Image (cartoon, rainbow, N blue to C red):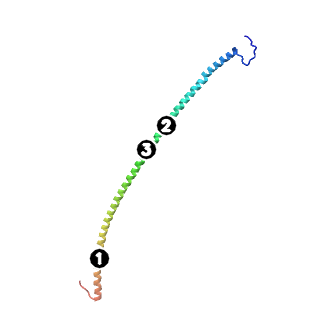
């Protein structure tokens, strides 16, 4: 080994080559041990995030479809309910008309029966009053004349 006596800032000798080779070996080992696994994990995470984004998009699409289906069903149920209410109202109107007609018929029957009863009672009352009036008239005439009348 020879000693070089030049004073320079950088001197290139065998130790520089050994340091360079050691550095390259260190870089290869660092690449194998640390950088490749980190890249692999990073790529796996990127792939996982892409899959999650795709699943989120699919889920949002399904939610939109369910929302549309729900809105359609809601509208159909609303229409059916409206039809049922309308049908019930029509039936109620018909039933009301039938009930009113029936009530009017019953009222007419009751009025007819009542009128017959009243007419019969009035006839009885007239007959009774007529007989009473005749009896009173005869009694008054007998008292006025002072004698008994024969009829």
Task: Give the residue number, with chain letter if any, for mark 3.
Answer: 72
- In the rendered image, residue 23, in percent from the top left (x then y), is placed at 65, 19
Task: Give the residue number, with chain letter if any, for mark 1.
Answer: 126
State the quadrant of the C terminus. Answer: bottom left
Classify mark 3: residues with Cα within 10 Å, few (<14), some (14-19) or many (20+). Answer: few
Q: Secondary structure at mark 3?
A: helix
- In the rendered image, residue 44, in percent from the top left (x then y), is placed at 55, 28
Task: Say left or right for 146 vs 1.
Answer: left
Q: Nearer the viewer, residue 97 or 46?
A: 46
Q: Residue furthest top?
A: 1
Q: Secondary structure at mark 2?
A: helix
Classify mark 1: residues with Cα within 10 Å, few (<14), some (14-19) or many (20+). Answer: few
Q: State the CA–CA distance, disc 1 to disc 2.
A: 96 Å
Q: State the CA–CA distance, disc 1 to disc 3.
A: 79 Å
Residue for point 58% across, 24% down: 37
Q: Nearer the viewer, mark 1 or mark 3?
A: 3
Q: Give the mark nearer the N terminus: 1 vs 3.
A: 3
Task: Give the residue number, with chain letter if any, for mark 2.
Answer: 59
Q: Nearer the viewer, mark 1 or mark 2?
A: 2
Residue for point 69% across, 16% down: 16
The quadrant in which residue 99 appears is bottom left
Q: State the CA–CA distance, disc 3 to disc 2.
A: 20 Å
* Vertical order, 56 against 117 (above or below): above
């Amino acid at each position: 080994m020879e000693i070089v006596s030049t004073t320079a800032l950088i001197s290139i000798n065998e130790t520089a080559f050994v340091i360079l080779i050691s550095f390259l070996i260190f870089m290869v080992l660092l690449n194998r041990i640390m950088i490749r696994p980190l890249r692999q994990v990073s790529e796996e995470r990127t792939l996982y995030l892409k899959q999650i984004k795709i699943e989120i998009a699919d889920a949002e699409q399904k939610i939109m479809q369910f929302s549309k289906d729900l809105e359609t069903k809601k509208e159909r149920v609303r229409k059916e309910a409206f039809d049922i209410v309308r049908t019930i109202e029509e039936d109620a109107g018909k039933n009301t008309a039938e009930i009113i007609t029936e009530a009017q018929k019953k009222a007419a029957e009751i009025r007819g029966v009542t009128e017959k009863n009243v007419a019969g009672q009035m006839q009885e009352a007239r007959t009774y009053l007529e007989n009473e009036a005749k009896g009173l008239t005869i009694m008054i005439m007998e008292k006025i004349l002072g004698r008994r009348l024969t009829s």
